[in-house]
Amino acid sequence: MHMTNLTGAFTADNLSYLFGGFMTTIGVSLFSIVISLVVGSIIGILLFEKIPYFSSLLGTLNNIVRNLPLLLIIFFSYFAFPELGIRLPVFWSTVCALSFFEASMIAEIVRGGLKAVDVGQFEGAASVGMTRAQALWHIVLPQAYQKMIPPLISQLISLVKDTSLASGIVLADLTYRGQMVYAQDSRYIVPILLLLTFGYFLFNHALSKLADYCQKRLA
C-alpha cells in the first residue's frame, strides 16, 4: 500500500467524518441492544410460559419475523411507516427495525435458556412459598441468563454488524461514511476498509469483554 494513499485517506477531515459515523454506529447499536434485550426477554418469557392460545400466536408471529430479511424490515421502517402516518428520522427508523428483528432472535434464545433450567427449581421455590413469578425472577432467570450469555453476545455482535445494512437508507454510519470517503478516490478503498474493519472489531471486542465480565459476575 503506497504511503500517499494513507496520507490522502487519513486526513484530519476524513478521520473526523469517519469518527462521526462510528459514533452513529455505536448509538444505533446501543439503543437497539437495550430495546431488543428487554422486548426479546419479555417475548421469550411469554413463549416459555405457554399461555393458552396467546403463546402459540406469539410464537407464530415471532417465527415469521425471524424468517424475514433484515433489509426488508429496515426498508419497511423507513419507507412504509410514513405512508401509515409515522415519520421517523433515519436514525430511529434503523433502531426500530434492528430492535424489532433482533428481539425476535433474542426471544428464542431466552425461551431456550429457560427450558434448559431444571424444572425442579420451580418446585423448590414453590415449596418455600414463592410464587411462580418470584421463582422466575429470582431463581430461574439468573441461571438461564448465565447459560444464555454466549449465544446472546453472538447475536448482539451480529446486530452491530447489521447496522451497516442501514447505509441502504442513507444512515450516516461508519460504513456509509467510509463509502463516501473512498468515493473521492479509488486508491483510498483499501486503507478505509481496513479502518472500518478495525472500528467494528474494536466495538465487538468490547462487547465480548463485557460478556466475559457479566458471566463471571453471574457465576
Image: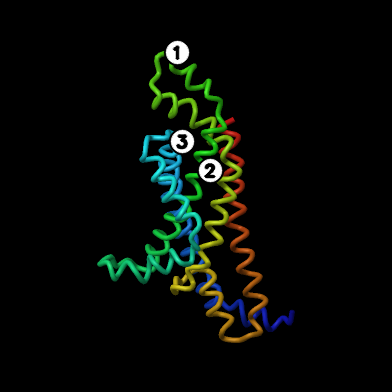
Q: Position of residue 146 (x, y in %)?
A: 57, 35
Q: Are marks 1 and 2 in contact (CB under 8 Å)?
A: no
Q: At 41% from the left edge and 38% from the top edge, which residue is drawn?
A: 46
Q: Which mark is residue 109?
A: 2
Q: Which mark is residue 60?
A: none
Residue placed under numbered mark 3 in the picture? 48
Q: Residues within 10 Å of mark 3 (few under 14, many from 20)?
A: some
> Considering only vertical position in the picture, is 68 above or below 192?
above
Mark in the foreground, 3 or 1: 3
Mark 2, secondary structure of its residue = helix
Give the camera-side residue of 100 and 205.
Answer: 100
Q: Position of residue 35 (x, y in %)?
A: 41, 50
Mark 3, secondary structure of its residue = helix
Residue placed under numbered mark 1 in the picture? 127
Q: Residues within 10 Å of mark 1 (few under 14, many from 20)?
A: few
Image quarter (top left, top right, bottom left or bottom right) of the C terminus:
top right
> Considering only vertical position in the picture, is 127 above or below 161?
above
